[in-house]
Amino acid sequence: MSDTDTYPVNDDAYAQLVAYLDGELDGDGSRQVEERLARDTQFRLELQRLQQTWDLLDELPRADVGTAFTQTTVEVVALSAERELHQSVASAARRHVTLWAITAATVIGVAAISYATFSMVFAKPTRQVARDFPIIDNIELYSVADSVDFLHQLDDQGLFAEEEVDDGL
């Protein structure tokens, strides 16, 4: 590689020269580049090389893109946007269905737990009442007894034979 293939200036100075040629520098930046060009030979040579490159680029034929290119580009962008919109809508729909499924599962779970709790709390007393119904039904007769011992004696004689009660509640 020869000395002419290497940049005699650093990257920042090179970027500053490119911006100068493109007209991107403000008044103060342009003035700084021009002052350095006046005193720095290497900087000036680099500017001349860049200017030659710019001049060669100006001589290249320009590609003529017609309205078809513009139309196709717009169509591609529109199709891409439409595809993105469909994906977004589908994603939102999936989130919506998932939310409803979670809500339904939660409601069913709460209902099952409530039913189980209700059954455990209220079924046992109901069964006990069913077993004790003959006593409740005859409470008036028991109230005329003189003592509990008298009722035990009657029970021992089999007078209070229990009736079969269906525990299927």
Image (tube, helix red, strand yellow):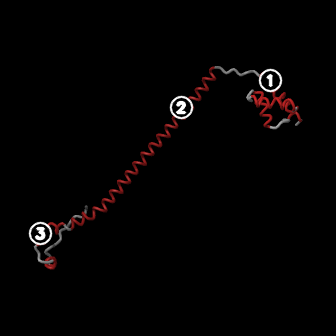
Secondary structure state at the residue bearing disc 3 = helix
Left or right relative to 54: residue 39: right
Q: CA distance from mark 3 to mark 1?
A: 123 Å
Secondary-structure class at tag 1: helix
**How far, Cα to Cα, is label 2 from label 1?**
43 Å
Q: Earlier in the sequence, mark 3 or mark 2?
A: 2
How far from the left and from the top, in percent, is residue 165? 20, 66
Q: Earlier in the sequence, mark 2 or mark 1?
A: 1
Q: In terms of depth relative to the viewer, which is nearer, 17 or 121?
A: 17
Residue position marked by numbered label 3 in the rendering: 140
The quadrant of the picture occupied by the N terminus is: top right
Callout 2 secondary element: helix
Quadrant holding the C terminus: bottom left
- Residue drawn where x is 37% and y is 54% of the image: 110
Q: Are marks 2 and 1 in contact (CB under 8 Å)?
A: no
Residue type (three-letter) at the residue carrying disc 2 = Glu
Q: Nearer the viewer, residue 49 or 17?
A: 17
**156 relative to 70, above or below:** below
Which residue lies under the disc numbered 1?
Answer: 55
Q: Nearer the viewer, mark 3 or mark 2?
A: 3
Residue under label 2: 82
Residue type at mark 1: give it: Asp
Determine whether 132 is above or below 99 in the image: below
At label 3, the amino acid type is Glu
Q: Residue 20, how many percent across, how many down?
A: 77, 29
Please report the residue visible at 74 percent of the width from the left and 29 percent of the height from the top: 26
Mark 3: few, some, or many residues within 10 Å (few <14, many ≥20)? few
